[in-house]
Amino acid sequence: MPRPSRLHAEQTPPAQLRILLVGPAKGAAEVARVTEFLAARGHDVIRVVQESDEPVAAAASAAVLDGADLVIVLGGDGSILRAARWMGYAQVPVLGINLGRLGFLADTPPRQAEAAVDDLLAGRFRLVPHMMLECELRNRQGTRQELGLNEVSVLAGPPFTMIEIDLLVDGEPATTYRADGLIVSTPAGSTAYNLSAGGPIVRKELDAFVFTPLSPHTLTNRTVIDSADRSYELRVPHPNPGSACVVDGRVIGPLAAGDSITVRRAVPRFVLVEVGRQGYYATLRDKLGWGGGLRAATTPPRGAT
């Protein structure tokens, strides 16, 4: 069994940590800078700079087996999704340094990277667990199982005509969606594809699944939120030639008549390291531009004294 991470909430970490540092090739300079100041503080740094998934996946697996305490991901939220997938069932706490745009998960700006690491090493951090999902695709070729952090999507695909998607909850028929597809999202994924499709934002501490149809034909088909304690099965009786099952943006496999997809809560949890004191709603205001009304309320009218 691999040694678990020695990071624990509200405790000062050990003086020397084993850290896996993952970043894209285009961010090599930033990766080098972070590596330098981590090494100067006496930490054991495993540096991985790759564009493709597979070499990083192998390095991440080896690091977990060797007892990594922390994974620092430089990139955007997509980079963190890949890191969660690489770690599989042996999740290690992740600190995200944002080299992308929005950054809900990777929310530390590069200019604050050193201060964030110093806060972490001083014990000023929180470990925030996020529910993960397990997707099981069963078809004529067998069974494929995938972990996800954001969502499972069933997409109609070419020739882009509407499909029917049957939903069963704990084996009981619930409804049939007639739509361009269906998103089954975790709370972490509620601010991703689900939000773009008009679905609700769900607080990440909750254990729930969000079912959001894409352009539903029936107006009563609206987003539903249900407990993560249940098992959900999806079937597409008459898929399009291009219909597919997608987990966190990756195509898991095409869909044929008779295939089924089961979605359930996964055993492991993705653990995000948060530093600073910004609250949940402050993050939503900053990332989604929610502050307009608040600003208007506190800004005097033009010409006022």
Image (cartoon, rainbow, N blue to C red):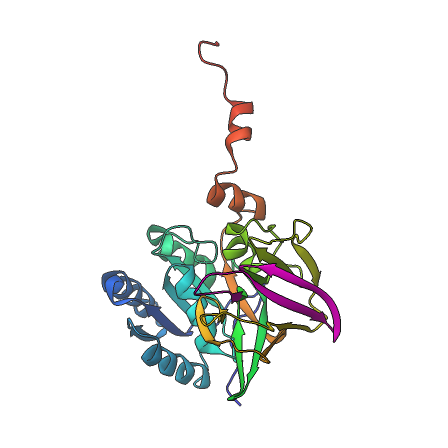
Magenta span main SS = strand
Residue 205 appears in which quarter of the rendering? bottom right
Q: Measured along the vertical axis of the image, is residue 298 above or below residue 116? A: above
Q: Is residue 164 magenta?
A: yes
- Residue found 60% across the figure and 80% down from its top: 258
- Residue found 49% across the figure and 43% down from its top: 288
Q: Measured along the vertical axis of the image, is residue 280 above or below residue 228? A: above
Q: Is residue 111 magenta?
A: no
Q: Which residues are magenta?
A: 154-180
- Residue found 57% across the figure and 75% down from its top: 135
Give the camera-side residue of 281 and 67: 281
How many labels sit on residues? 0
Give the camera-side residue of 94 and 57: 57
Q: Is residue 206 left or right of residue 150?
A: right
Can see residue 117?
no
Q: Is residue 292 left or right of residue 174?
A: left
Q: Position of residue 158 (x, y in %)?
A: 43, 65
Q: Position of residue 37 (x, y in %)?
A: 30, 64
Q: Measured along the vertical axis of the image, is residue 72 above or below residue 293? A: below
Give the camera-side residue of 186 and 22: 186
Q: Measured along the vertical axis of the image, is residue 209 above or below residue 65? A: above
Q: Position of residue 305 (x, y in %)?
A: 48, 9
Q: Position of residue 294 (x, y in %)?
A: 55, 30
